[in-house]
Amino acid sequence: MIETQNLKSKINGVAAALKRPVSWLLLGLGFSASLPFLLVGQTLGFWMRSEGITLTLISYLTGISLMYGLKVLWAPWMDRVHLPLLYRWLGQRRSYMLLTQVVLAAGLAAMAVLGPKAHLIGFMIAATVVAFAAASQEIAIDAWRVEETNSRSDQALNPSFYSFGYRTGSLVTNSIVLALSDRIGWANSYLVIAATLGVGVVSTLLAPRTANELRHTNEARSAKDLIVEPFISFVRQHGRAAGIVLLLLALYRLPDYVIGPVVGTMYQDTGLSATTIAAIRGTIGLTASYIGVIVGGGCVLTLGLERALWLGAITCPLTKLGFAWMSVAHGDIGVFTGVLIADDLSNGIAETAMIAFMTSLAGRDHTLTHYALTYSVMAFTGKFLKLFAGQIVDGLTPGHGLFGAYQLFFVGSAAIGVPALLLIWLARKKGVFSANPAGSSPA
């Protein structure tokens, strides 16, 4: 009887959450957030590789995506400092969302005009601006989303809708843009993406101000409030478990991050065409991603956050062994498809679980900075280590051949995912998962 009542309660909670516009707006905001992510990472590597740039240099240059791991440095200012004019019209969160979207479009257009071959330095400056604006857009969107997460149903649905939008945007920058590049060139493809950011602009203008934002409209903005207090409050909130939480965040998605600069070039080196990659990614791969997001959200809602994290931590490293297989399969379409399905499924699960986990860690008094802190810790380690991914493959190539080097690299990327399993167990012992799903202090 109790289990039946719990199930009915969960269903009613989901139904109520689906009636709110927040979840649906997160589709558009997630889409907008995902567009620049690969354009300064893996997809940028495709473009530079097609211009004859070495794998080592590509890894270093795509290190501009490290901005995502550093955004905690300027997040406190975005949490409290008002933008002139825009603040009166849109409020704190949406004003930064709109500003960053405009800067993103301008930066992508500059990259398209300059190109990596003719003006490499100017091109990378424009790409750095895009990376900074992209990370800042995520800061503002994440804060808005966390402040609109008020129940366990929200905790499951909001990350799921955001991930659906994010995965759809990834289809554009991970698949469609590759097909476009074969037909209209890389520069024009980036211009198309710049125009597509209009989806995020519309979603931003439709989004409401959060209740938490309205409560803090006139609060003091001293240096201590901006910089020191958010970090003190995070440690105070999580106590002795804070170190374990931060270490778990740093290692959980590490295998996915480190393969970023290498996996796309491996596809090309094994003989897969951009059109083939785009076709499979945009159909079977995207479907697998959506299913993974649904499974991840379902696990958070029905099994709990801890079990969802376990599932992601187990499956993500295992799929990297599939890439090791792919690297010596020499362009086999069946192997590519199978590995892509497995990886997209596991990524959907892990991504949704991790977003829900980080949301649960963010306190209401410093929402934006707390979430930026957890995201930066998660992203920085992987994005820093991936700078050396290309150099590792190039260094292994003389002794093992190019494809043997790829294989060893992906086996190693699977191994570095193992410590996350121990950290989840330690976090459980410390009572981390007993925290309120809406993001308040632990019970």
Image: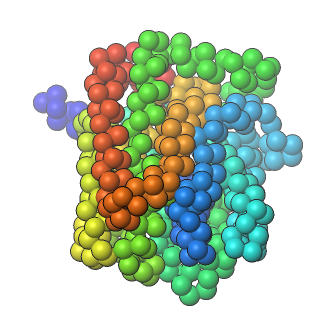
- Picture residue at 47% right of the left edge, 72% below the top: 175
Q: How many tags in the picture? A: 0
Q: Is residue 19 visible?
A: no
> In the figure, residue 121 lies in which quadrant?
bottom right
Q: Quadrant of the C terminus?
A: top left
Q: Position of residue 334 (x, y in %)?
A: 24, 74
> In the figure, residue 221 lies in which quadrant?
top right
The foreground one among 6 and 440 is 440
Q: Position of residue 393 (x, y in %)?
A: 43, 57
Q: Is residue 355 above or below residue 46?
A: above
Report the residue that reaches farthest toward the right: 84
* Colour treatment of the image: rainbow
- Picture residue at 64% right of the left edge, 72% below the top: 190
Q: Is residue 224 visible?
A: yes
- Picture residue at 86% right of the left edge, 46% below the top: 85
The foreground one among 15 and 156 is 156
Q: Is residue 99 shown left or right of residue 203?
A: right
The foreground one among 104 and 161 is 104
Q: Position of residue 358 (x, y in %)?
A: 47, 34
Q: Is residue 404 above or below residue 436?
A: below
Q: Quadrant of the N terminus?
A: top left
The foreground one among 196 and 268 is 268
Q: Position of residue 355 (x, y in %)?
A: 45, 41
Report the residue that reaches farthest toward the front: 399
> In the figure, residue 437 lies in which quadrant?
top left
Q: Is residue 442 above or below residue 120?
A: above
Q: Is residue 261 above or below residue 316?
A: below
Report the residue that reaches farthest toward the bottom: 183
